[in-house]
Image (cartoon, coloured by chain):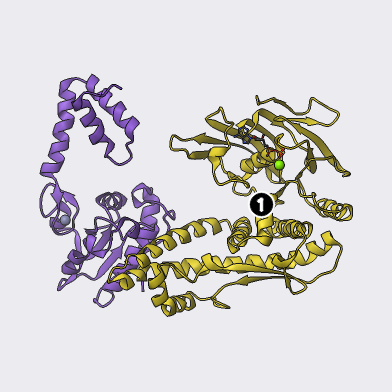
Amino acid sequence: MQIGWIQLVEFRNYRTLEFSPSSHLNLLTGPNAQGKTNLLEALGFLLTGRSFRTSRLSEVPRWEATSSSVAGEICRAEGGRTVRRMIRKLDNGGAQASGDTCEWARVIAFGWQDLDIVTGAPGARRNFIDGFAGRLYPGHLATLLRYRQILARRNHVLQSRELDAEAQLEPWDEQLVSVGMELIGRRRKAAAMLQTELGRVFPALSGVRQKVEIRYRTALAEATEAAEMLAALVRLRRVELRRGVSLVGPHRDDLAIELDGIDVRSFGSRGQQRLIALALRLAEVLPVTEAAGSTPVLLLDDALSELDARVRQNVFREIDGAEQVFLTSPEALPARRAACWTVRAGAVLREGDADVARGSVAQA
Amino acid sequence: MAYYPEPVARLIDALQRLPGIGPKTAQRLTFYMLKRPPDEVRELGDALLAVKEKITYCRTCFNVTDEDPCRLCSDPRRDEHVICVVEEPNDLLAMERTGEYRGRYHVLLGALSPLDGIGPDDLKIRELLARLEGRETTEVILATNPNVEGEATALYLAKLLRPLAVRITRIARGLPVGGDLEYADQVTLSKALEGRREIS
Ligand SMILES: Nc1ncnc2c1ncn2[C@@H]1O[C@H](COP(=O)(O)OP(=O)(O)O)[C@@H](O)[C@H]1O
Ligand SMILES: [Mg+2]
Ligand SMILES: [Zn+2]
């Protein structure tokens, strides 16, 4: 799929912007703090109604404004759709998003925060696998939300210190294990697909043949049945009641990512860590394309920094097989078949052609 | 700093305590009321008092009613072998709107909700057990909401009622997950009722 055009109003540092990108590779270059990442965020928001860089949508409306709007056309072989979305700031400091949804739209975004997948705490890897599973199975994020609700209530019962806490736990245990095993099942399938693709993508980027392994790590070992998770809960009942927290389930799990048998967390060089994170994102492309029935739009924020020239060429070769790609960079990049845009102070200009996209400059 | 005259502040304060009404709305309603003719305001005041004075809970099913037992409990044409358990009176109304259900009801007046400190003793569960004792009830339909609290309540009740010789069913999840029974459309709701299943 691809974005035919997008229009922003009061979005981050863009007062207004109309942008009709190329259907293939778009290079967005310009100095720092000009709006490159903001534009990627807007493209992602148009497609999914979410921001890949923040969960606080109240940051998004331009500082002097109370709301943002984004409109645009999303196209695929079966036809296009015009989508409009709004973000309105609320009195209580939050924000409310509203507007059209496009069920088949998919985005894969890479940004600085993705380094956490490799080097961060288990939570970052759980978010990563859940994001991927959500692109494969549309119900996954709703299931995750339900799981978190059950978990919060179950922990509350564990902490209540009431005499009949054990009896009160039962209906929460039952829901925790059925919803929990549903999540684990989808995460395992997602991890298996990722491993297969990463085994191809990583060597293609690094130029080095290495054995790639991704394992889903859970205290439940190989368990696949809700009854097995329930048994684990029963075994841990005393400890859980004492500590007041739920000790088994998908909220405690992790992914082990290994190259030639070595856990990537122990890799020293930042360049290498970033390359692994980028490879993980690019490994999502094929499975997501197959599951969604159409290619995802790629948003790659500063994906080439800290990579050497040879690896950069490999990245270009890899994304050449994708459909629509947006790649930001502080400096010009030697890419063939790319539409080159300059981003400066909330305006996007086609290189050597000032008329293609015009945005009014936001006041500093 | 200027203050509102006491009666104005008192009404704003009272309105603010209603669910879904914040300070701004409470102010707007108060000043709207000041502008209305006295009769209209008196009618509202009377209606508020009447609902509290004339309406009680049915001591059998705990639906809201102006007579005890309520019309549903005293209607001889309703099948007394089947009891449909719901969380709130408005869920009962939603069920009635389907026109499909001819049995009786039991309103729990809530759902298990640890975050709000609501446990089994805070719901009309003991009263449900008392109703089932020695009567010829053959089926209990658990029609609590499909959200996590409603599901926990259904699971809790299923376990509790299992030793009794009654069929226990749970309405099917044709309902939007995370939604409220009250807002479900009639088609969805009658589908859910049709597809109810045994709960073990
Ligand atoms: N809500 C907002 N309103 C106005 N400006 C914003 C808002 N959020 C971020 N900015 C500004 O946007 C700029 C950063 O843009 P960004 O897209 O991250 O830059 P880069 O081109 O380096 O990727 C900063 O100058 C920041 O102050
Ligand atoms: Mg940036
Ligand atoms: Zn009654």
Q: Quadrant of residue B46?
A: top left
Query: Going by the picture, which residue comes out furthest to the front?
Result: B1
Residue drawn at the location 10% of the way across and 53% of the way down: B68
Q: Residue at x 20, y 65 (%)?
A: B128
The residue wearing badge 1 is A113
**Image quarter hosting the C terminus of chain B:** bottom left
Left or right relative to B196: residue A106: right
Say few, some or many: other residues with alpha carbon within 10 Å of mark 1 (under 14 / 14 to 19 / 20 or more): few
Q: Is residue A131 above or below residue B133?
A: above
Query: Residue placed at 84% from the left, 51% from the top?
Result: A316
Q: Nearer the viewer, residue A120 or A103?
A: A120
Quarter of the figure with residue A140? bottom right
Closer-to-camera residue (A75/A121)? A121
Q: Is residue A190 above or below residue A292?
A: below
The chain drawn yellow is chain what?
A: A
Indicate the position of residue A67 as horizontal and vertical percent values. 54, 31
Q: Is residue B189 visible?
A: yes
Q: Position of residue B18 (x, y in %)?
A: 27, 39
Q: Position of residue A36 (x, y in %)?
A: 72, 38
Q: Subunit of mark 1?
A: A
The residue closer to the viewer here, B1 or B155, is B1
Q: Is mark 1 within 8 Å of ligand 2?
A: no
Residue B196 pos. (x, y %): 36, 64
Q: Quadrant of ligand 1?
A: top right
Residue B47 drawn above or below residue A134: above
Q: How many marks?
A: 1
Determine the secondary structure under disc 1.
helix
Quarter of the image for the N terminus of chain B: give it: top left
Asked whether residue B104 is in view, the answer is no
Q: Amino acid at mark 1?
A: Gln
The chain coloured purple in the image: B
Q: Is residue B154 left or right of residue B40?
A: right
